[in-house]
Amino acid sequence: MSAKAPAALGGTTTNKGDRVHLDIEEGDKAATTQDDDTTQSEMFSDINDDTPNITELQSLCINCHEDGMTKLLLTRIPYFREVILMSFACEHCGFKNSEVQFGGTIQEKGVRMELAVQTREDLNRQLIKSDTAVIVFPEIDLEIPAKTQQGTINTIEGFIAKAIEGLRENQEERRAIDPATTQKIDDFLANLALMAAGITLPFTVIITDPAGNSHIENLHAPNVDPQLKIDTYFRSEAEDLICGLQPDASHAHDTPSNAPRVLPPRNAGLDTFLAQNNNIAKREAIRFPTQCHSCFKDGESMMCITDIPHFKEVIIMAFNCEHCGFKTNEVKAGGAIPPFGERMVLHVQDASYLDRDVLKSDSACVHIPEIELEMMSGSLGGLYTTIEGLLDKIAENITKGNPFAVGDSDGGRSGLRIWLDKLEALKHGTPFTLIIEDPLANSFIYSPFGSAADDPDMTCDTYVRTEEEDDELGLLDMKVENYSSEVIDNLSGQVVSQVALSDKQTMERGGQALATSGYHPNPNAVMELDAPRTEL
């Protein structure tokens, strides 16, 4: 084994720089913790390093039962995540095998990707299949289970070829025992070969990965791939066990769904504090304890409510973990939902415009026509940054979402590298047009002239939301005007002619108890009835 072999084969790379520990009493403990963190950060080396840290282990060959050599490489793929590359070779019988395992964290949600293979070029798309992913070809009822070809990086054609190779094993022995079944398998293999050669087109490839670590190459990056559909979902309890996670027993969640298993906890003390001191948030930042989403250690979130001139009141929330360096921030607009959406257009003439502040809500769309950029609502979330910072966030988001479109694996097919160069040129003074369209009118671009009406390079117009936008925002389910006096039954949907009134509306004195002065002097005596008795 190599002298530089890591002590463990797992974990994630922490984003942590050198820190000075001022705790004198626990100085030795702090130094030990810092050394452990440094060892963990050096565990995964960059894939482009000149001297890769390869670990060699002697292991048993499953073919000839002699000793072979297994090589391990813990590396970090740019714009993707940490992986463990394993390769086995036996010098006695020549048997070879390779495998890829993910050394990073399991994603918060599972992923389901559906690709329509329409041309031969689509067969060359690279695909990452994690240990928990299942690949399905619905046209021919072929399923590659999670334990088959697990941890593999290959093309779609390569996965089909591997499936053909696996099904051809023992065909001759099977032919002597069951010729009918063997002939059916031969016909099935012929169909697979036609698909791998690009003769039988089109067909569909579906990947379902509860760990969320699988990926299909997007040839149209940074634009949306019309042939690729990606959906995320919350795992079921059975899928949590498959991923090696402890299922959450606090909520019944037997099947995958798009609804979270656990609602986010509310801070009742903070709500009461804000209700009693409704102006304190505007005077200072409120701090409250929060658990870090990366290392799960205790941290501190800060929240501040501020008024933006010529705009509205916004809520800024930020979190910075002192243990692992994880950072996040979010901006939410306050106030009621406006009746119209808003479209802001800024003509950026030179690099001096890049310092303008930008508030982009999570419902806003960003467009830059010069580079054919169109980001849908929900992309990047809520941001409060500058125009330059917005361009950096766009570049980071697109490169991380398309790991195959950057580097040697691109091969010049997607053209993303050329597009990123155009995006980089915008930060160096190339004129462009920034369009932010927000159906909730919760976005803002700063103007040194005070307002967009006085800015010669900026326009701000309102527009009527479409029915589709109202439906996505949930506005069609809310009725806030023109109430009807008719009462409709929830079950039957019919108009109720007579409404059943409550006891407070029908009883004398509104259902209140009798005064003590109205009590009968003898509680055991028979009280006088309001209606006469019926004699039998």
Image (cartoon, rainbow, N blue to C red):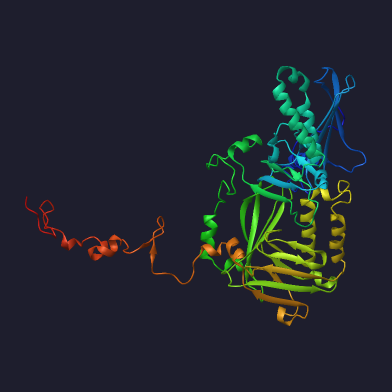
Asked whether, in this view, residue 121 is left or right of residue 281, the answer is right
Q: From this view, report whether residue 109 is shown above or below residue 509.
A: above
Furthest toward the bottom, the residue is 454
- Counting labels gives 0
Asked whether, in this view, residue 229 is left or right of residue 489, the answer is: right
Query: Which of the pair 303/35 is nearer the observer?
Result: 303
Position above or below: 210 against 344:
above
Left or right, 105 with respect to 55, comes to left
State the residue in front, 88 or 488. Answer: 488
Q: Position of residue 95 (x, y in %)?
A: 86, 24
Rendered position, 356 above or below 453? above
Image coordinates of residue 183 in percent, x first then y, are 73, 26
Q: Quadrant of residue 50?
A: top right
Find residue 504 and report its image quarter. bottom left
Query: Looking at the picture, how far across and down is residue 487, in whole percent?
Result: 38, 64
Q: Is residue 43 visible?
A: no
Closest to the observer, 127 or 440: 127
- The spot of residue 309 in percent (x, y) is 67, 75
Name the residue: 62% across, 35% down: 241
